[in-house]
Image: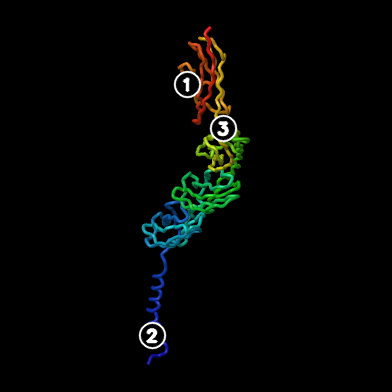
Amino acid sequence: MLSPLARRLRVTLVALPLLGSLFLSACDKVDLTAPTDSSITLTTSQTVLPVTGKAEITATVTESAGTPVQNGTMVYFTSTVGVIDPREARTENGRARVTFAGNGTSGTAKIGATSGSAVATEIEIKVGGAAASRVVLNVSPTAVPSTGGTVALLATVTDADGNRLPGVPVSFTSTAGVLANSTVVSDDNGQARTTLTTSAQASVSASAGAAESGSIAITVASALQLTLTAPTGTLTAGTPLSFGVGIVDTNASPARLVTLDFGDGSSQQLGSLSGTTTVAHTYGNAGTYTVTLTAVDQLGQAYSRVAVISVGARAPLIVNVTASPNTPNVQAVVTINVAVQPAATQVQRYEYNFGDGIQTTLASSQTTHFYATAGNKVITVRVVAVDGSSATGRTEINVIQP
């Protein structure tokens, strides 16, 4: 039987190996960190990133003598924005590498690293809007019709060096109207697009992070004021009718296209018109006609005015022929005059037959002729109008042999 002292000694001897095993196991789980007076230098592959971009972060750890730390030295990384993966890494040849990734949030990521008592100087990566230094906004067009319209907004985002930035959230604002999207992420070309629909004057702008564009005004064009004055009184086919046309445009430029449709299958282009003018038209047949004046402004907005007229049957064409003198001598000059009713008839030609076997066609309502023989002469004149109608008049003279 062992004495109490021997039993205690035996327990102690048995426990010593077990304590040693526990101590060695605990030492195995302690991470290796940089020795005292070591230093850490951080570098990054990119200093500007989209909101979902990635960059490699390298921590270079050296001992006080300038030599790389032992392989497997643990380095711990931190970041104020985004995600570090993994958050800790072991060195190989004095370098530990991790990946920084944006998580959709704009900001300036301050990235740090530690190992033991060594603390790195933080580096910065500008993410998303934080990298934006300038926003240029373009609007097309800068005016909408009086009834409203849609304009395209294009924002280009660049950094301090003028490089275009993809993946940057751009915010659009407008004092009036409806934006298709108020926030758009810039594409691979650093551009963000949206549209604005408005019927009121508006001021638009765009911003990315602290960078803002200037405001651009979108104006609303004033409506064209059209007047169409139809002829009054007794209107007849075959008679030229006058229509008064007026265009009042308070915008900078005149209406780009003005058309007067007479309602009988014919129309007249008046081009770019501002102010008033008179347009003549002759209807070939009796009837009721709807006359339409249409004007399109510089923004493509169309305006119109309508007038309805009733055109009566064509007035009969009457031709009066007179000759002077009425009793001329042989070889004397005779002047022949032709008068047509209605007076507004547009005559195409006058077909003269002097009654002595001689005929001629002229565009004039007056001509002269002399006769070689005495006797009664019947002078006839057929008048043909522009619209194709015709009528004949006659007179008789007595030629005297002196």
- Whether residue 126 is visible, yes or no, is no
The reply to whether residue 371 is visible in this rendering is yes
Which residue is painted at 42% across and 87% down in the image? Answer: 5
**Gap in angstroms between the C-alphas marked 1 and 3:** 24 Å
Q: Which residue is mark 3?
A: 315
The residue type indicated by label 1 comes to Thr
Where disc 2 sits, the SS reads: helix
Q: Residues within 10 Å of mark 2 (few under 14, many from 20)?
A: few
> Mark 2 is on which residue type?
Arg
Foreground of the two, 240 or 170 = 240
Residue, far top: 402
Tell me which numbered mark, 1 or 2, is placed earlier along the sequence: 2
Q: Can you identify the residue that label 1 sits on?
A: 361
Tell me the quarter of the picture where residue 235 sits. top right
Does 13 appear above or below 366? below
Task: Name the outermost residue toward the right.
Answer: 233
Q: Nearer the viewer, mark 3 or mark 2?
A: 3
Q: Which residue is mark 2?
A: 10
Q: Amino acid at mark 3?
A: Ala
Say if 255 sits above or below 158 in the image.
Answer: above
Left or right of 75? Residue 228 is right
